[in-house]
Amino acid sequence: MPGVSGVGSAVSSAGGYAGLYGGYAAAALAGLAGPPPKRKRRHRTIFTEEQLEQLESTFDKTHYPDVVLREQLALRVDLKEERVEKPIRF
């Protein structure tokens, strides 16, 4: 196909499609399948009642708080900004 470079060489190498896919998929397509790599699990944050109240109150007013509001809220409730998310109650 004129104008498209690299596709033919990627398809022809290592079992056909290994050049187009990375990691486990390439190994599986090349016939080298093994167990998938272990992923590190993130521990679940356990919120206090006070943190839940602050989070719920904020998310009731603003469903999608911007990064500045999330950072301010994180400081108020003593959490990392990436842990500031809408709480799910079961």
Image (cartoon, rainbow, N blue to C red):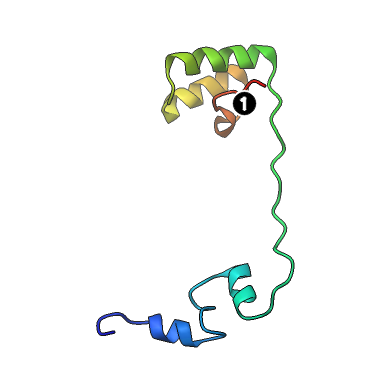
Q: Could you say where residue 60 lies in the image, as x and y percent from the top left?
A: 48, 14
Horizontal and vertical percent position of residue 8: 40, 85
Residue 7 is left or right of residue 33, and the answer is left
Which image quarter is the C terminus in?
top right
Q: Residue furthest left?
A: 3
> Which residue is labeled 1 in the image?
79
76 lies left or right of 65:
right
Q: Which quadrant of the figure has residue 85?
A: top right
Asked if residue 39 is positioned above or below residue 21 in the image, the reply reads above
Q: Which of the pair 28/67 is nearer the observer?
A: 28
Q: Is residue 19 left or right of residue 34?
A: left
Rendered-image quadrant of the N terminus: bottom left
Residue 33 appears at what percent x and percent y? 70, 74
Query: How far across and how far down the image is residue 87, in percent?
Result: 59, 23
Name the residue: 49% across, 18% down: 59
Q: Nearer the viewer, residue 30 or 5?
A: 30
At horizontal 64% and vertical 20% (from top left) the residue drawn is 89
| Tally of marks | 1
Residue at left offset 25%, top offset 81%: 3
Is residue 80 shown above or below 19?
A: above
Q: Secondary structure at mark 1?
A: loop
Q: Is residue 81 above or below residue 3?
A: above
Q: Residues within 10 Å of mark 1 (few under 14, many from 20)?
A: some
What amino acid is at disc 1? Leu
